[in-house]
Amino acid sequence: MLYLVGLGLSDVKDITVRGLEVVKGAKRVYLEAYTSILMAADVSSLEEFYGREVIVADRELVESGSDQILEGAGKDDIVMLVVGDPFGATTHTDLMLRARELEIKTDVVHNASVMNAVGACGVQLYNFGQTVSLVFFTENWRPDSFYDKIMENRRLGLHTLLLLDIKVKEQSLENMARGRLIYEPPRYMDIRTAAEQLLEIEEKREEKCYTPETPCIAISRLGSPTQKFAAATLAEMAEYDSGEPLHSLVILGNRIHELESDYFMQWAINESTLKSALVEDGKLHK
Amino acid sequence: MLYLVGLGLSDVKDITVRGLEVVKGAKRVYLEAYTSILMAADVSSLEEFYGREVIVADRELVESGSDQILEGAGKDDIVMLVVGDPFGATTHTDLMLRARELEIKTDVVHNASVMNAVGACGVQLYNFGQTVSLVFFTENWRPDSFYDKIMENRRLGLHTLLLLDIKVKEQSLENMARGRLIYEPPRYMDIRTAAEQLLEIEEKREEKCYTPETPCIAISRLGSPTQKFAAATLAEMAEYDSGEPLHSLVILGNRIHELESDYFMQWAINESTLKSALVEDGKLHK
């Protein structure tokens, strides 16, 4: 059997009781460690908590070595640990499909992910439109397709959850070209960078998808003991020090229920600025 | 401290390790038992698993008795158990706001909910638009506001997750009028009823938001050992026996990635019908 087991958001103890039982009883346990990170745990703390070895599965292994991962899964239990919920990334759908081809049974232990835990910031999950990913801009690659998706949500008055890029075990172009397995230090997009990139594309496109006055909620270290929210305009977010990773950003839509604003107003960086921004921004996509 | 603890989807063991610790150490533990149900567990099995008393909190208590729930939470730990993730329903936002007013500290233990676990059906979470609730029609009350929301999603090519009504501890109008605390048996909307209601409103509105040929995925008992998916047209769904509750329904949008259809095709009730339906439906919102 192949088990995909979600680890939740932050701590070793965020695994479910059933997930922990599956991990303890498995023949081999892999940890997918490149699409996200568990904020308050590393591999050795997982190994200590489980009382067993955990094999780190990098991109090469998960994307090209699925048969190696699945070896023996016809008779033994193999576990792939995934930060958040197992279906947050397409990668694991691939692995499930490959298991089915090999007639290996599969099971999933679900857990929280940013996709549902984002509700903690005070806006309702059913008022969100499509989720959008924001990648790090480079000197020559500044893709702006996210802008159209945010526009689609904003025109409907819906909130947008932006998942911010993480770069783990990435090679520089030079090292990649020379075939050197030297990896760059991990990078996690912070709120400031996200806001700057968003404003840059608005300046370029000028379609008034959002403005520097558009109200947002910054979500930092969701589900961890140092979790922090901030509600502010996009311009304020471009100056905001969000601290340690991980971060996500919500761009609010104008279909805001009073219960939502009552709740997120407690995180306001500047309450009067935010209140007038909510009024002004509300006129943008009438 | 007030803790909101998510229970996940199905089994007593779907609680997280941290959630279980919080429950065991708390002074009082409530279970919110009217916006959803834990499929494979009842109060006595929770009590047995936790080794402690669990107080069932019905609608009256949660919505009007928050001060009773919060009594003593300034010094003791009080837990509210919530099926899925604590922020699935607005109810718990209210309770958090009330705790803040009383200067009671709060913490949340997140868990899986249908809002993220729906990814298990094979379509990607970031291809979903807004989530829509579908309530039981009555003879005189057949609200169709869901239709406009599905239309908004469909015009963008996005999938729609439909949360199907559950009625737990509801009074009949007659019993309510007479003040009799007699409750109707619980009812959970099945896939067939959902599909019939959807088709009825399309017939009435005739705006071609969807048709009997629109492809959908039925999700039954998500996250439980008897979990089942079915991929079929809406007309087929109106004939589909989905078995025991709970159920959700996904109406597919036409932005379907090949990896998605590769995956959900395994649940097809009739593969050739579904394939041609995907082609035909794809033309509807071009």
Image (tube, coloured by chain):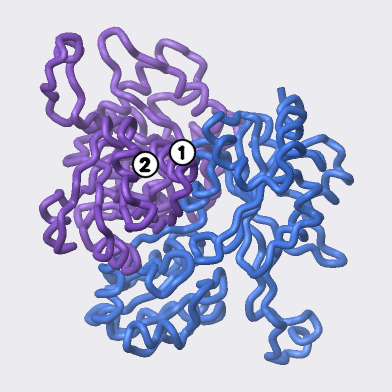
Chain colours: A purple, B blue
Amino acid type of the residue tagged 1 in the rendering: Leu
Splitting the image into 4 quarters, where does residue A238 fall?
A: top left
Nearer-the-camera pick, A256 or A118:
A118
Q: Earlier in the sequence, mark 2 or mark 1?
A: 2
Q: Mark 2 touching mark 1, by CB under 8 A?
A: yes
Q: Secondary structure at mark 2?
A: strand
Residue identifier under label 2: A217
Q: Secondary structure at mark 1?
A: loop
Give residue B135's position: percent from left, percent from top: 71, 61
Give residue B210's position: percent from left, percent from top: 77, 38
State how many labels appear. 2
Splitting the image into 4 quarters, where does residue A241 fall?
A: top left
> If the image is split into quadrants, where does the N terminus of chain B sit?
bottom left
Give residue B193's position: percent from left, percent from top: 77, 60
Please tell me which residue is depicted at 50% across the width and 20% down the height of the picture.
Answer: A208
> If the image is split into quadrants, where does the C terminus of chain B sit?
top right
Q: Residues within 10 Å of mark 2 (few under 14, many from 20)?
A: many
Residue A252: mark:
1
Q: Is residue B83 above or below residue B234?
A: below
Q: Is residue B32 above or below residue A134?
A: below
Please tell me which residue is depicted at 44% across the width and 39% down the height of the picture.
Answer: A98
Whether labels 2 and 1 share one chain: yes
Give residue B90's position: percent from left, percent from top: 50, 61
Amino acid type of the residue tagged 2 in the rendering: Ile
Q: Chain of mark 2?
A: A
Splitting the image into 4 quarters, where does residue A219 fall?
A: top left
